[in-house]
Image (tube, rainbow, N blue to C red):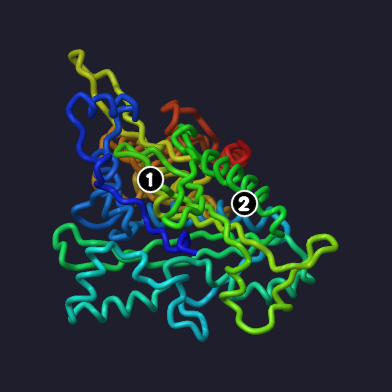
Amino acid sequence: MSWCAVGLARVGGTRRMFPAPLLLQCRRLATGGRTSDDILELCRRRCFLLGEKMTPASVLGGRHSLGPLGAQMKRNLIKEWWDAMVLHREQVLPIDSLCRLPGMSNPSPGPPPKTLSKACLERLQNQSPTQEELEKMADLRQDLLNGALYYYPSCLELLNRKLPFGITEVGRCFHPISDNEDPDTCRVGERTAASLVWFSSAKTCAQWRDYWLRQRLLWWRKFAQVPSRFSSGDHPDEDGMKTSLIQYDFPWGKEPIERLGILDDSALTQMHHGPIAHLHGRDGRKSAIPHVVWMSSDVEGGLLAYLCDALQVMKNAAPRGKEQRRAVLKIHPSLAPVILAVDLGKGPAADLRLVCQGLCTELRGRGIAVWPGYLETLHTPMEQLFTRYDEMGVLFTALVSDVTLESGLLQLRSRDTTIKETVHVSKLSAFLTQHMAAAAKL
């Protein structure tokens, strides 16, 4: 079961070394002009991520918190995952297990030191002050597999012992990470895992593995601007077991965002001691202990992948023949943290704010995420306003003006096309709802 203890891929290894200027230029062309500095700086400036000294390693290692926009986007990503894996499927049961399961001192499969680097483990074992850190790590779950294995008999009974079926869960997991600034210390990184454990007969397990790998890759590509940046490949672990990785091609290189592997019936027999009759499930006429296909997604890693995918650097013509670059986060409508920003145009500010307030209240009541730009008291030029909302990934900007007071018409600007069109206030909600529904079907 050593596959279960596989940690995050390293950032900063040999293949991640800072490239020579020519290679760097080629990399920028291949990624549409995006660099890791561009992405992380935008995430910091617009509060998708919180914290200082952001690097790819620190972000993927779980050393940064999410800001308001990042938290909302993560919520949307989990909702889409949940709908795809639970809501629209039969025979998939959700659970919410404890971080420390009853009667288990270590909720992660296998001894926790297997996830620690050799140098880090030696430091923890040889220095008495950090021995407590190792013991503390043993009590923190590093994945969600054991929760599904532990509650497998209860879920099997609920389904009248019929195979195949799946158990799914979303929850916080922890893993040790080295501190780049102080190599003699180790920290605990946090991440949110989205896990599906699929139980099937030994005969059909390989078929289910291929099915789920295909489905998961299609799901990741569904929300991408450039689907080809998501790819899959096999990765043998130290015991020779084949693990499939779904990876995203970040500007600094490929990183895994989901892992998929197969475990035999020993996964259940090692978890449940004593008589094994209660572990048998029926697949047709045959009854046996099932094999396991396990998928585990790194939600924060996927979030960063979609932010990288959405970032586009556009060139605008400026006076005197100069070009200006502007960043646009073309986040998929289903994942966008803000659908509409409501702001003020020309007209009496007090009256316009009342209209904006009523409009925002109505849209929020219909489940549409709104940014109340009209509450800003400092005047901002319109182009700067649009630049800010483009960097926030806001789909549309509604400008309420004196024309709105007279006729109910407002200007609606699209993030993706920059086209402004006139829409009546009474039809705005229906327009946004139809746009979101159409985007979800793509």
Q: In the figure, residue 279 lies in which quadrant? A: bottom right
Q: Residue reaching furthest front?
A: 240
Percent x, y of residue 394: 41, 42
Q: Is residue 85 left or right of residue 46?
A: right
- Front in this rendered view, residue 363 or 440: 440
> Residue at the spot x=26%, y=49% of the render?
44
Q: Is residue 139 left or right of residue 93?
A: left
Q: In the figure, residue 292 lies in which quadrant? A: bottom right
In the rendered image, which quarter contains the C terminus? top right
Please state the total of marks drawn on the protein image.
Answer: 2
Q: Is residue 245 left or right of residue 387?
A: right
Can you see residue 36?
A: yes
Percent x, y of residue 429: 57, 44
> Residue at the spot x=23%, y=20% of the render?
323
Is residue 151 depicted above or below 244 in this figure?
below
Q: Which mark is residue 84?
A: 2
Percent x, y of residue 70: 38, 53
Percent x, y of residue 435: 58, 37
Is residue 256 depicted above or below 26 in this figure?
below
Residue labelled with disc 1: 255
Can you see residue 413?
A: no
Q: CA distance from mark 1 to mark 2?
A: 23 Å
Q: Residue reaching furthest bottom?
A: 103
User: Could you classify mark 1 by the number of other residues whose Cα lies within 10 Å: few (under 14), some (14-19), or many (20 or more)?
Assistant: many
Is residue 163 depicted above or below 307 in this figure?
below
Q: Secondary structure at mark 2?
A: helix
Q: Which mark is residue 411?
A: none
Answer with mark 1 or mark 2, whichever residue precedes in sequence.
Answer: 2
Which amino acid type is marked by label 2?
Ala
